Image: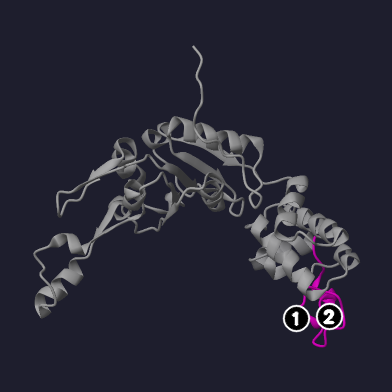
Amino acid sequence: MSYQSTFQRWNGTESYIADDGLIAAVNVAVALQRPLLVKGEPGTGKTLLAHAIADGLGLPLHTWHVKSTTRAQDGCWVYDAVARLQDSRFGDRDVRDVSQYIKLGPLGEAFSSEKRAVLLIDEIDKADIEFPNDLLHELDAMRFVITETGEEISAKHRPVVIISSNAEKELPDAFLRRCVFHYINFPNEDRLTQICRVHHPDVDDKLLAAALRRFMALRSVKHLRKKPTTSELVDWISGLRLAGIDPEKLSAALPFAGVLLKDESDAAKAKKAGAMESDDDSDDSDGNKGGSGTGWRGWR
């Protein structure tokens, strides 16, 4: 039996560099109309993936940023009981019409969209352990009923659902069974070069090569609490360019190390491993020596 695919394929975008495995995962999730669950290190582009899919397919994007206090219903609708109480006290409007106090959440907006939409459920693992299970019915049935009004909201078009997770909590098996899964590996040096050139198309070749060598050496330091990420690399290169850093200085020093390292114990480990200069080599108050420094003067 042969299947003839008619769905619109996603092939990445000019601003989002995706490997073949990720492109395949996105397209099979779209074809099967299943949520795509993506995991990976922070900074590997999990959140930006949904934006890139919406951009590449020409679809609207609805974003649901999950917090520790988020309930599944919040994505469907929110009932503003406080506003209704205030109106009943001061007589500003007819409070018998409950619908005027109902606001659709990101999931409800995606279901109500006149055209197919992309829905990002960002960092689902931040919520309570029961949160994914509470979403199962809505994601399966693509409909829900607003309790206060009895109105049913049914998806006009099944949205492309992208779910990101930083693996802070294990997700229930019943939820995982309904998803297509993909782990975004940290990019290798060649792909990092491509990514950096997307954000810095006119960057000097020597500066980019030197920055990548220092960045990869830093990530190779063992037992870092938080390894520097792709987004931090892009920011670091911006700082190097703005300060006019000589690429040759990067072989011996790590300017603006605070852009890459966000923990004092990680800085100590990097110094011990020789991945950044010692305190003796840091900028002095006049910026006369080459070190990480806190200003620009020593790096011009």
Residue 137 is left or right of residue 183, and the answer is left
User: Is 45 located above or below residue 248 in the figure?
Assistant: above
On the image, the x and y values in percent for residue 256 come to 74, 71
Q: Which residues are magenta?
A: 275-300
Instruction: Label 1: state its secondary structure.
Output: loop
The answer to the question of whether label 2 and label 1 lie on touching residues, with beta carbons closer than 8 A, is: yes
Badge 2: few (under 14), some or many (20 or more) residues near its Cα, within 10 Å? many
Instruction: Label 2: state its secondary structure.
Output: helix
Q: Residue at x 42, y 41 (%)?
A: 171
Label disc, if present, on residue 174 of the rendered structure: none
Q: Quadrant of residue 249?
A: bottom right
Q: Nearer the viewer, residue 19 or 169?
A: 19
On the image, the x and y values in percent for residue 2 come to 51, 15
Q: Report the amino acid beneath label 1.
A: Gly
Q: Furthest-right residue in view?
A: 248
Label disc, if present, on residue 298 of the rendered structure: 2
Badge 1: few (under 14), some or many (20 or more) residues near its Cα, within 10 Å? some
Label disc, if present, on residue 295 of the rendered structure: 1
Q: Nearer the viewer, residue 40 or 144?
A: 144
Quarter holding the C terminus?
A: bottom right
Q: Report the amino acid beneath label 2.
A: Gly
Q: Is residue 53 visible?
A: yes
Residue 160 is left or right of residue 78, and the answer is right
Q: Nearer the viewer, residue 155 or 162?
A: 155
Residue 64 is left or right of residue 143, and the answer is right
Q: Quadrant of residue 261?
A: bottom right
Q: Nearer the viewer, residue 215 or 136?
A: 136
